[in-house]
Image (cartoon, coloured by chain):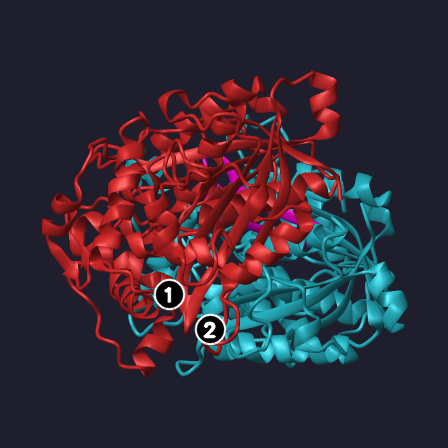
Chain colours: A cyan, B red
Amino acid sequence: MNEVAVIGVGMTRFGKDPNSTVRAMSEAAVRDALADAAVEPENVQAAFFSNAIAGLITGQEMIRGQAALRNTGVLGVPMFNVENACASGSSAFHLACMAVSSGMYDVVLAVGAEKMTHEDKTRSFGAIGTAMDLEQLAEQQVASHQGRSPFMDLYAQRALDYMERTGATVSTFADVAVKNHAHGVHNPHAQYRLRVTREEVLSSREIVPPLRLLMCSPIGDGAAAAVVCSRRFIERRRSEKPVWVRASVVLSGRDRQPEEPTVIERAAAAAYEIAGLGPEDLDVAELHDAAAPAELITYEDLRLCEAGEGPRLLASGHTALGGRLPVNPSGGLLSKGHPIGATGLAQIAELVWQLRGEADRRQVDGALVALAQNTGGFLGSDSAVTSIHILAA
Amino acid sequence: MNEVAVIGVGMTRFGKDPNSTVRAMSEAAVRDALADAAVEPENVQAAFFSNAIAGLITGQEMIRGQAALRNTGVLGVPMFNVENACASGSSAFHLACMAVSSGMYDVVLAVGAEKMTHEDKTRSFGAIGTAMDLEQLAEQQVASHQGRSPFMDLYAQRALDYMERTGATVSTFADVAVKNHAHGVHNPHAQYRLRVTREEVLSSREIVPPLRLLMCSPIGDGAAAAVVCSRRFIERRRSEKPVWVRASVVLSGRDRQPEEPTVIERAAAAAYEIAGLGPEDLDVAELHDAAAPAELITYEDLRLCEAGEGPRLLASGHTALGGRLPVNPSGGLLSKGHPIGATGLAQIAELVWQLRGEADRRQVDGALVALAQNTGGFLGSDSAVTSIHILAA
């Protein structure tokens, strides 16, 4: 396996923009990523495009990447449209890394974009629900939900289980939102840049108990891109500040017994082994806080703390900016936003900036090793897919 | 780049089956491919799943592979959902080859499945139309079509251009259908197994002049799968009859001037170079005859004959079973059927059987080198994607 590095990233500001299109957002992210990499469109040898719900929102299916990138100058190369629910973006990134590590390509582009806003909000929520196994839901006679993402019902159940197991309270979840919103204030790409208090989170609209609105990632639009390349290309171009991909793991979930590891635990174990690193080596992490309790559960799945110690780790301040291992310095999905197909690549963009020391007021001092965790879909008793990427300066 | 081989294939009989589901068809194709490879589900280290229109037909998006394969025993491994219009199946196959050639995996599964039949036929045709750039179509104020695939309008235009350039007549196109249907009679997996005459083709319902119904591939349901592995795995398992992947190329299309090569010409040239082979080395080919004229145009793009000589090559009988280079011994898309996400993998299955000498009454004697061409979507003045695979016994 050949070494792989990221030499350029770009992303749009996430948010609700009725006039945005998948194509225009993709063009902006690609332009920024190529400029950051000092690479011309004609240097790109292959592209992976991730999108999750355009077919159900805009009607475009099948050649989403070709349609989105048609004016970027990269058309003509091998191009693949990749879908993996909320982990679509990191799946595209993983395949771009695989394409380089195979030795077939030296410069590969990964682009993720999502247009989620629709004048009919139930259509956005309905589209999100297609990240579950519809046949299985029908068999289990699970009702379809109106007016909210069906994921929030599942996150609410996990939150209740977590409260029972660890003694976490609703305030603990509120504190995750307070921390990540405080980080997002410093991120010009974030959908929300407002400091919130625990009281504001707890008094925001109830979605599904125990979840409140400010504990849930918002609907939004956005795009992100990364340029991945080989060591050979870096040496030839004398690229500055490459960020090395030390581990790239994507695993699918499966029905599991309670005592069996989750897909996140399995993916993390595999990534630590590949990188030859452990949780104690991490300096910064971007985690998939689609709902606030997920961040705490993931602390434990990644072995950032012992089982049941998530609330204590949060309360210690170690995972806030200024702490030992800041988590979601970008603001996370809660504050930065979660345009599905772009999310995984936006995590990579944030970590590349952190490892280069370019994250301005949200910079984690001296960050050398970073981890991104991106999770998507539900299937039986686990998530349908999880990726773990470990990057190093 | 490591060597890659196919050691097992499987497919369902293609056809219109109101009771079929993407999951049940996928399970059948995977079961047959794993049995053919003598590989257990737990040996599979990664999977690529291709599907084009399930989101618009069944509602399932985002985790189509996980949902389709949940009972096959392969869940838990890296799994990617791949879309590339009518070339989705060969794109999944290409990525499976790339995964093995990267050295990361020894045994990878590629599965393609499509459920196209819907009680409301306009929904099937509407879904097919999403393989074009919808924004571009809207800009060009192209009307949406009712009661037929919008692709047939584009194929009709290409047919008219081809007639003008080469002197082909409507009867020439009819003869492609006659040939491929005569082949399909011998294929137990074909949607149609009926011999047709030139007169029957010419008197079948007019779709768009000069195309008649029997010159157009049908709507259908089906699945196909292939098990791809490394030389290391073959040597360890002493697998019999591996079929080697000598070239695997997927390229996206782009707007082009008339004198510039088509995406099929570019992909073929790249594949011949990688394989170190030329058109004169081929013994059998499966080509993307979504409409009859496409087979003739592709003869020329693949350099099976000189420009303008497609009608003469067909009339010579060289591309019929018993000829020098039989094309579409399976019956092609015209007779075997074209369930979008499965098509590219069904081509691979047919060629693997041919190269092993297992194609029964449609066997091409002594076939050692085979080529598959799978093309999808439209974008500006060219197809949106084309793959070329060259396989050898």
- Sequence-wise, the earlier of marks 2 and 1 is 2
**In the image, what residue type sits under mark 2?**
Val
Viewer-nearest residue: B373 or A362: B373
Q: Is residue A138 left or right of residue A172?
A: left
- Above or below, comparing residue B192 to residue B32 in the picture: below
> Circle 2 marks a residue in which chain?
A
Residue B129 image-quadrant placement: bottom left
Foreground: disc 2 or disc 1: 1
**In the image, what residue type sits under mark 1?**
Gln
SS majority, magenta:
strand
Q: Quadrant where the C terminus of chain B lies?
A: top right
Residue A99 location (% of width, % of height): 69, 53
Tag 2 residue: A22
- The tag on residue A60 is 1
Q: Residues within 10 Å of mark 1 (few under 14, many from 20)?
A: many
Circle 2/circle 1 CB separation < 8 Å: yes
Give the residues in magenta.
A373-388
Q: Residue at x 60, y 72 (%)?
A: A74
| Mark 2 element type | helix
User: Is residue A12 in view from this perspective?
Assistant: no
- Above or below, comparing residue A231 to residue B28 in the picture: below
The image shows a total of numbered marks equal to 2
| Mark 1 element type | loop
